[in-house]
Each structure stands twice: as C-alpha cells, then as structure tokens.
Amino acid sequence: MGRIWSILFLLVPILGVAFFVWAIADIWPLNNHWLPENINEPSRVIDGLFMFILYLTGTVFIGTSLLLFWFLWKYDADRNAEPVKYMHGSHTLEVVWSILPAATLLFIAIYQMNAWANARMRRPTIGPGVDLIAGTADDELKPPLALVTGRQFEWRIRYAGKDRLLGTNDDVFTVNDLHVPVNEEIVLQIESEDVLHSFFLPNARVKQDVVPGMRQFIWFLPGKTGRYDIVCAELCGWGHYKMKGRLTVESADDFNSWLAAEHAKQEQSSFSASEGEE
C-alpha cells in the first residue's frame, strides 16, 4: 500500500507540470488561462522576472517531489526489513540549505531592482525644467493625464479640460471608462475616496494599492490599440466583484476627438442645467 501512495505523490509534479505547459501552450480547454497579453513595452521585464521565478521554484518543486517519491518508494514499511537508523543531524547540511535559499532570495532581490525602479521610481519627464530655488535645470515630471478615484464600487475618472489643468471647472468626467493615446507615456494620479482599493491594469502589468489620504502616481506605455480590463485587486466590500472598468487605447487623433466630444457633451449638459434653473 505504501508504494501506491508513492505513485500518487509522483503524480503531483507530473500533473502540475503538464497543466502549466498546457496553459502556456494556450491549448483548449486551458486557452486564455495564462498571462494576459502585455501591451506595455517597458513592463516586459516583469514577465521575464515572473517566468524566471516560476522556472526556479518549479525546478525546486520537481526536485523535492522526486525525492519524496524516492523515499516513499525505497523505505516502504511493507517491503523494507532493515532496522530503523537514527541520526543527530548534519551541521554541514544545515548550513548549505540555509545559505542556498538566502543567496537565491538575494539574487532575486537584486535582479528585480531595475523593474521596481522603472515601475515605481522613474516617473516619465517632459524635458528640462528650472528649479527656481536651487537655480538648477532638471527634467520636469510629466503631469498626469487623468485623476482616477476609487470608491465603492466604481472608478471615477477626471480629465483636464481645454486648459490642460486638473481640478478646474472644465474638467471631463467619466465612470469606469479610461481612454489613453497609444505609443505615449501615460501618467495617472490615483486616489481613494473611502477604503483601500487596488488599481489593476492586467494588460499593462500595472497594479497599485490606492490608499485613502495618499496622492499616488502610476505610469505605463501602451503599444497597441484595443479595449482592456480595469479591475480592483483588493477586497473592498460586498461589491468588490463588480468594481471593474474598461481601458481603451486608441490613436492620438481618436483620443483627442473623444475628449473633445466628451467636453462638448458636458458643456451642453451644464448649459441645459443652467437653463432649467432659470
């Protein structure tokens, strides 16, 4: 009976690897179960980091599973008549299996530093600006295209109007509908109106917790037109499941036309409202 259990344990790595390969190959019925299409060129390093960690942990998983199978098979109590042997441990072995994981984690930490810097520290700039206090010229940070506010249970999006300034009277508002131009570095300001949310663009590999009381920025470079998902990746209440929106990546001309049309609709709505009050 013990060897039957060893065979069952052996099926774990075999089936695990088979399902992973099946999903990566995008074959029915596991098609569309792997990573979504990546439209953000700078974030391809994140996919490479993910696959590296997957292969590394997968190798360890397969190795330990095979060792488990071998021990179960070799030392099956029903077939092994050898007396039990005791050992008091090995300091050398303990040092080795402490140093190897530590070195591996340190390598991963160093390997991902550039990916972290690109995603969280190197905000896009629009050319040199002047620091009036220090008297030095530095690259000016690119202003946000839109302000995205998370609230239970929707994403409210605010675009600058004709004056190109957020927070003025001619701002354009949408709900769960984010439009951006293709092949341009996009900067978004994100905030929360109530509880902790997480703004997640799976196809851009962008995910950032939205913390109440904090002003945060995210950026990405969409390289392909299309419509993609916006989701909340943080449990934020009973309606968390429906807190989703749509990211539309379009040409610069189409984006400008859409923004102008939204602005015209908003102006018309404001004009109609003022006429009604009179």
Image (cartoon, rainbow, N blue to C red):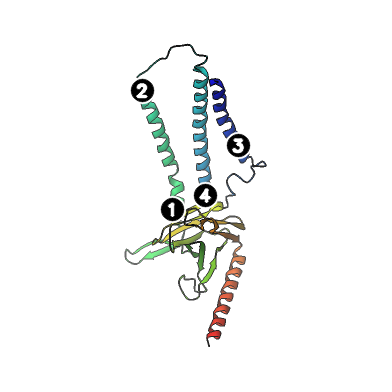
Q: In the rendered image, which residue does mark 2 sit on?
A: 92
Q: Amino acid at mark 2?
A: Thr
Would residue 100 be found to the left or right of residue 75 on screen?
left
Q: In the rendered image, which residue does mark 4 sit on?
A: 43
Number of residues whose C-alpha sits closer than 10 Å to that of mark 3, classed few (under 14), some (14–19) or many (20 or more): few
**Which badge, 4 or 3, comes first in the chain's sequence?**
3
**Which badge, 3 or 2, comes first in the chain's sequence?**
3
* Contact? badges 2 and 1 (CB < 8 Å): no
Q: Position of residue 264 (x, y in %)?
A: 58, 76
Number of residues whose C-alpha sits closer than 10 Å to that of mark 1, classed few (under 14), some (14–19) or many (20 or more): few
Task: Quote the CA–CA distance across marks 4 and 2.
Answer: 41 Å
Q: Nearer the viewer, mark 2 or mark 1?
A: 2
**Which badge, 1 or 3, comes first in the chain's sequence?**
3
Quadrant containing the N terminus in the rendered view? top right
Number of residues whose C-alpha sits closer than 10 Å to that of mark 4, classed few (under 14), some (14–19) or many (20 or more): many
Task: Quote the CA–CA distance across marks 2 and 1.
Answer: 41 Å
Taking the spot 52% from the left edge, 24% from the top edge, the residue there is: 69
Q: Nearer the viewer, mark 3 or mark 2?
A: 3
Q: Amino acid at mark 4?
A: Ser
